[in-house]
Image (spheres, rainbow, N blue to C red):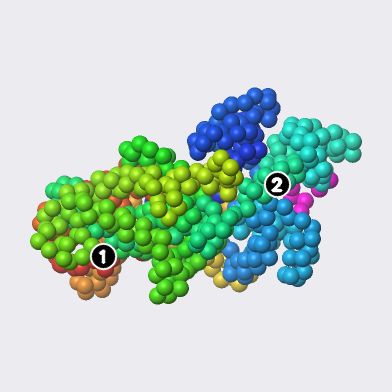
Amino acid sequence: MTDQGDSNQELVPFEPDRARVDANIDSMVAYADHVYRVSQVLDFTTVIGIDVESGRAAALPIAALKPVAKEKVEGLYAYYDIAAVAAEEWAIAQKRYAAIQPLIGNVVVGRKEVEQRAEEVGVGAATLYRWLGKYRDWGELLALIPRKRGWQQGNSRISAEAEEIIRSVIKGFYLSHQRPTAQEAVERVKEACEAKNIASPSPSAIRARINQVSEKEFFRGRGFAEIARNKYTPSPGSFPGADFPLSVVQIDHTPIDVMLVDNVHRLSIGRMWLTLAICVHTRMITGYYLALDEPSGISVAMCVAHSALPKEDWLTVHGVEGEWPVWGFPVVLHSDNGPDFQAETLKRSCLLYGIENRFRPVKRPKFGGHIERLLGTFMKKVHSLPGTTFGNVDDRDGYDSEGKAALTVDEFEVWLVREILKYHQEYHSKIFMSPARKWHVGIFGNLGVDPLVGMPMRPTDPFTIQRDFLPSFERTIQHYGVEFDVRYYSEALRPWINAKDEETGKTRKFIFRRDPRDISVIWFFDPVLKQYFKIPVANQAFPAASVWEYRAAKKKAVDEGRAHINEELIKRYIIENRELVASAQARTKQARRQVERHRRHSKNVTPAQPQPQPVQAPQEQPAFATGMVDFDLNSFGDVS
C-alpha cells in the first residue's frame, strides 16, 4: 500500500489524525489560516463563515475546511494505534461508554438525569459528567481509556487556574442567552487572568476549548434548546433504530451477474464481487468495494472506509459528473454473521469510531431485507449488460455469457458509479421520494419539517481512517528488521531492535498494519512518537505483490519439494508466474483473471487515495523457461 509517498520516504512519519470537521451552524472551522464560525449552511458543498477576527463573512468550500486544532494532551489514547490498547483497557472504555450512552444523544442533559444514571451504574455524577465531556470533546472511544502511565496533570502548558477560568467563562458567559462572540469570550478570559495575576492563555488555546463545546451544548446554552431538541431528536421509523440518516447502515456482498473482460485481449476473466453499504433510513448507498477475490475482511474494511469518506475525488477519478454527498460514520453497522464481519480488527475499528456492530439473527434473512433488495435491484440492472449470467439457468439457456462479455473492470466500475448516482435520484416507493431527497430532508429539513440531524462530521485525514480498518499484527523487531511472510527493514526500526518489555522482561512486540493487496510495504506504529512509519520490504528487488500472489508462489515451491524456501526463490516464482500468465492470458480465462487482479491491485486505488499511483517497474529478471508446474490459484484470495 503506497498511500503517502514512495518507498524512499519511509522515514517520514505520519501521525494518526482522526479529527473530523463539524460544518454545522455555529461550529468553529479553520480555512486558509483563519478561524470561522459557521453562520449558514447553503448545501453539501458550501457554508457561510464569519471570520472570528475581522467579523467578515465568506463563502467556504466544505471540502477544504479543517477543524480548529486541539492542543495535544500527553498520555491520551486518542493518539495511539487502536491495536496498542490492551483488552482490559478496552473493557474499561466500553464500560464507561455503556454508562454514558443513554445521555450521548440528549440535547439537554440535566443534573437529575445524570444523577439518576450515575446511581444506576454505581459512579459519582461528577465522574459521569467527566466521561461524557471527554467523549464529546474527542468523538471517539479511545478518549474514555485511562491515560497512559507516567502522564502528569501538570504537563499541560496552561495552568490549572487558567483552565478553570476558561471553563467558567465558557459556561457562564459564552453559553448564555446574550450570545457573545468567541472574540468577546477570549477578551473576558484575558481580563479574568489579569485580575488574578496569572498568565493568560493564547487566543488560539482559548478558541480551541470553545470549539470543543458540542453543538447541542451550544444551542442549549445560548437559548436554542427547543430548536436543538427538534433538530436532533429522531423520529420513529419502520426499521428498529433507523430513525435518521446514518443511524443504521447495512452491508453485504454478492457476486456480480456479468462476465468482464481483460484490458488487452477483451476476453472473459469471469465475475467480480461487489460489497455494498446502504443507509436504511434514506436508502442512500454510502459506499462500495469491487474485488476479483471472494469477500474477506479487507473487502469489508475498504467498503466501510469508502462509506465514511467524502466522494468528490472518487467521482473525479472515475470521470463521472454528479454529486454523492455522503460521508460520516454510521451509528450501527448491520450485517450477517459471516467471518469477514466478525473479525476482531473490524470490531475494534468500529468501536473506535462509535459504530455498533449488530448482526442479524441466523437464518432470518428478512432482517437484512434492505441490503438484500438493493443487491437484487442492481443485479437486475446488470442483466441488460453484454456478458450477463442472468439470475437463473432458464434465462441463461442459449446465451454465451463469456462470448458476449465486453466490459473491462474499469468500464464496469464507471457504469456502476453512474447507476448508483442514478438510483439516488429515482423515486423509492418505500420512502415516497428519492433517496437523495430523503437524505437532504434528513439533514437540512424541509418546509414544515425540522431536520433530523445536522451535517455529518467530515473526516479530515482519509489515510488514518483507512489504516484504522486495515488488518493489524504484532511482531518483535530483530537485527534484520521484522518478518511477516517476508522481511521488512527501515532505519525507523533501529531504536527498537531486541527491545525488552519493562514489565515482563521479554522481547517487546510492536504493532504493524498491512494492506493484503500489496505486501511490499507495511506500517509501523512507534509507541513513543505516536506516529506511523512506512517500512518497505528488505529486499528492494522484491516486486509489489499481494498476499494471494505471494502464497501461490510459495505453494508452488512447496509442491516442488524444495527443502529450503527463501525470498529469492519466492521472488523468482512470482516473476515466473507473471511471465507464464502473460504468455497464456490470451488462451485461458483464469490466467487473464490473474493478470487483471494484479493490474487492479498494483494501481493502489483505495477509498483514501482514489488517484492511481505510478508503479515502479521491477528490475529486469532472466526468463526461466523450465521447471514450471500447474497449480490452482482459485483458493488464494485477499487475506485479512
Q: What stretch is highlighted in magenta?
A: 153-161
Mark 2 = which residue?
226
Residue 459, numbered circle: none
Q: Residues within 10 Å of mark 2 (few under 14, many from 20)?
A: few
- Residue 158 included in the magenta stretch of the image: yes
- Can you tell which quarter of the image residue 78 is in? bottom right
Q: In this view, does 230 lie above or below 629?
A: above
Residue name at image x 58 percent, y 63 percent: 85
Mark 1 = which residue?
552
Instruction: Tell me if residue 361 can be seen.
Output: yes
Q: Position of residue 402 (x, y in %)?
A: 14, 57
Circle 1 SS class: helix
The amino acid type of the residue labelled 2 equals Glu
- Can you tell which quarter of the image residue 637 is in? bottom left
Residue name at image x 50 percent, y 38 percent: 44
Q: Position of residue 378 (x, y in %)?
A: 31, 55
Circle 2 SS class: helix
Given residues 245 and 35, the one toward you in this image is: 245
Residue name at image x 21 percent, y 65 percent: 392
Q: In this view, does 205 lie above or below 300?
A: above
Q: Distance between the residues labelled 1 and 2?
A: 62 Å
- Residue 64 included in the magenta stretch of the image: no
Q: Where is residue 163 in the image (x, y as percent from the top left)?
A: 79, 45
Left or right of 445? Residue 538 is: left
